Image (spheres, helix red, strand yellow):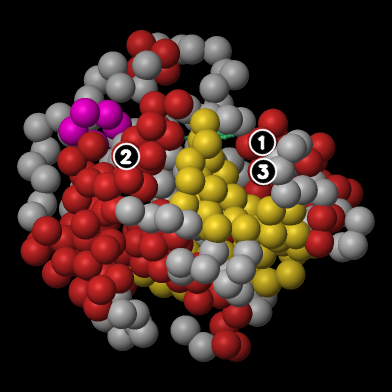
């Protein structure tokens, strides 16, 4: 990716290619990129009441560390990244895939897909955003994406991984302890409640809701952060258009769109950087 790619115009050739989320009640389902679990929604089935009532990967073998490390090398080929960071990603992936046997954390279990869809996608945000010395909230982190790869990549950023589901946050805390990540912490709370009392430089969000729903969710706490960064799939431009009026009304301004591709034709992705009202000197 080049610097010129950092400001691209919306493309019209959006392809419907769902981003598989990790974590949350819908992990393991075929839900699209923007289907987050809404804990306030009425339960519709046993799986809605307890997302782990049916374990999707109870018997899926956990790849070895070597396999995961090789997958990281494949996904990050051509990227400027330190070898020890790929070791850390592989270690973390192993903890996640092991945990996936006792709770539904991620539908993505094939090592190369894990490496590209969870780690490369998350890590690339660190190429786009100035992070040193900043406070970042990963809203709706699920199993810890994108927050954990970001915290592992940049020790000088303070990362809070937040999810409304206590069980996911207990798991994220296990990961933080197992990997010893001093700049990361995890909070079980709804984003709109947490942001009413806490301020951040950046709110990062992947696979929680549509652009429009995300800005609506944050409307009452829009002064709590400077940048709202959404990690999206190929239908980002349609979503951004659908959110345009609402975002403008609430003072969110789309500043940068960075499109990128995952290797092995694993899909197109985009980062949308909205300047939030909290960054306008209000
Ligand atoms: N961000 C992760 C990823 O990309 O793999 C997980 C996405 S998962 C589909 C969506 C998560 O958002 C769920 O774990 C859900 O509990 C959480 N969530 C949904 N609405 C939320 C809210 N208002 N506050 C905090 N977490 C929320």
Q: Which residue is mark 3?
A: 214
Does the magenta stretch mainly form a helix, a strand or a loop?
A: loop
Query: Badge 3: few (under 14), some or many (20 or more) residues near its Cα, within 10 Å?
Result: some
Stretch in magenta: 100-104
Nearer to us in this view, 101 or 26: 101
Mark number for residue 194? 1
Provide residue 85's location: percent of width, then percent of height. Answer: 30, 71
In the rendered view, tell whether residue 61 sits above or below residue 121: above
Separation of disc 1 and disc 3 at Cα? 15 Å
Is label 1 or label 2 in front?
A: 2
Look at 58% across and 30% down and name the residue there: 189
Q: Which residue is mark 2?
A: 174
Mark number for residue 242? none
Q: Is residue 141 magenta?
A: no
Is label 1 or label 3 in front?
A: 1
For disc 1, does the CB lie below 8 Å from ligand 1? yes
Provide residue 72's location: percent of width, then percent of height. Answer: 23, 68
- Relative to 96, is 16 on the left or the right? right
Look at 29% across and 53% down and name the residue there: 179
Provide residue 111's location: percent of width, then percent of height. Answer: 18, 57
Q: Secondary structure under badge 3?
A: helix
Q: Earlier in the sequence, mark 1 or mark 3?
A: 1
Q: Quadrant of residue 121?
A: bottom left
Query: Badge 1: few (under 14), some or many (20 or more) residues near its Cα, within 10 Å?
Result: some
Provide residue 3's location: percent of width, then percent of height. Answer: 57, 87
Nearer to us in this view, 168 or 132: 132
In the rendered view, tell whether residue 174 sits above or below residue 266: above
Is label 2 or label 3 in front?
A: 2
Quarter of the image with the C terminus is bottom right
């Amino acid at each position: 990716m080049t610097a010129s790619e950092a400001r691209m115009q919306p493309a019209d050739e959006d392809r419907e290619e769902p981003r598989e989320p990790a974590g949350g009640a819908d992990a393991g389902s075929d839900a699209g990129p923007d289907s987050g679990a809404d804990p306030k929604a009425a339960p519709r089935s046993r799986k809605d009441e307890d997302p782990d009532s049916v374990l999707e990967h109870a018997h899926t073998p956990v790849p070895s560390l070597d396999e995961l490390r090789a997958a990281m090398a494949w996904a990050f080929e051509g990227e400027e990244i330190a070898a020890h960071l790929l070791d850390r990603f592989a270690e973390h992936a192993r903890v996640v895939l092991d945990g996936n046997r006792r709770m539904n954390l991620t539908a993505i279990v094939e090592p190369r897909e894990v490496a590209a869809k969870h780690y490369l996608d998350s890590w690339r945000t660190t190429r786009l955003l100035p992070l040193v010395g900043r406070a970042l909230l990963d809203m709706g982190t699920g199993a810890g994406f994108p927050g954990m790869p970001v915290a592992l990549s940049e020790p000088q950023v303070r990362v809070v991984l937040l999810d409304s589901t206590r069980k996911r946050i207990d798991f994220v805390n296990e990961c933080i302890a197992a990997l010893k990540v001093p700049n990361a912490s995890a909070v079980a709370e709804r984003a709109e409640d947490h942001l009413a009392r806490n301020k951040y430089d950046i709110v990062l969000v992947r696979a929680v809701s549509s652009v429009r729903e995300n800005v609506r969710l944050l409307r009452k706490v829009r002064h709590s952060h400077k940048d709202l960064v959404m990690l999206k799939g190929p239908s980002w431009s349609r979503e951004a258009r659908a959110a345009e009026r609402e975002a403008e009304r609430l003072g969110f301004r789309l500043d940068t769109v960075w499109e990128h591709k995952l290797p092995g034709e694993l899909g197109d992705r985009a980062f949308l950087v909205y300047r939030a009202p909290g960054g306008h000197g209000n």
